[in-house]
Amino acid sequence: KAGVTQTPRYLIKTRGQQVTLSCSPISGHRSVSWYQQTPGQGLQFLFEYFSETQRNKGNFPGRFSGRQFSNSRSEMNVSTLELGDSALYLCASREGGQNYGYTFGSGTRLTVV
Amino acid sequence: GQQVMQIPQYQHVQEGEDFTTYCNSSTTLSNIQWYKQRPGGHPVFLIQLVKSGEVKKQKRLTFQFGEAKKNSSLHITATQTTDVGTYFCAGAGGNTPLVFGKGTRLSVIA
């Protein structure tokens, strides 16, 4: 099975711009979650989607949004980028609910300048 | 909201020494998961504990879930250089999302 695929791997954006990150989960995995990883804050939860429905949302401003498509692929969007949004954005998928472990993608490294 | 605290933040050991990281939750968890992230890599799922007092072993790694389901530990016996990385615990309760601790970064000196 192919793993979780995230594109792009690296991204450099200017403050004020917007960005869209993409995630293709493992085939058959309907649950997709997004995490932001920074050295100071660790892994912080952004969203969780299951069968195109947002099940949970983390404590991030409204500039962060996401969605999941019928094929389970997911995107997250960050508008009006700030310097503090520079981070590694990780997507993770799992077969079902809480009793399954996550398989993470390699992440998208976003740098805002 | 739910918080998961993990200590220590860093641990440096000589190869062959043991290593333990501890995880504490502010609320009772339905399960706890452990992940390992190698430098420059992404988190990789190691194991999940569900039952109160559960102990699971994977070769030199021993995972425990507390009786109250609010704490957990990971113990590595006789560390090797391949054990280098950051170990994260992550807990979930009810319908809440998986909340990660900040991790323990393990360095192994050969």
Image: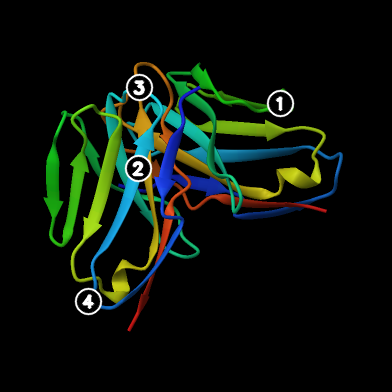
Dot 2 alpha-carbon crowd within 10 angstroms: few under 14, some 14 to 19, many 20 or more: many
Q: Which of A2 and B98 is in front in this view?
A: B98
Element type at mark 2: strand
Q: Mark 2 points at which residue?
A: B23
- The residue under the point 45% across, 27% down is A71
Residue position marked by numbered label 4 in the rendering: B16
Please tell me which of labels 3 and 2 falls first in the chain.
Answer: 2
Tell if the residue under mark 3 belongs to the same chain as the one under mark 1: no
- Residues beneath discs 4 and 2 located on the same chain: yes
Few, some or many C-alpha atoms within 10 Å of disc 4 (few <14, some 14-19, many ≥20)?
Answer: some
User: Which mark lies nearer to you, 4 or 3?
Assistant: 4
Which residue in the protein does label 1 denote? A61
| Residue topped by disc 3 | B93
Secondary structure type for disc 1: loop
Q: Picture quarter containing residue A96?
A: top left
Query: Measured along the vertical axis of the image, is residue B7 above or below residue B84?
Result: above
- Marks 4 and 3, Cα distance to the nearest angstrom? 36 Å
How packed mark 1 is, by other alpha carbons closer than 10 Å (few <14, some 14-19, many 20 or more), is few
4 and 1 marks in contact (CB < 8 Å): no
Q: Residue B49 carries which label?
A: none
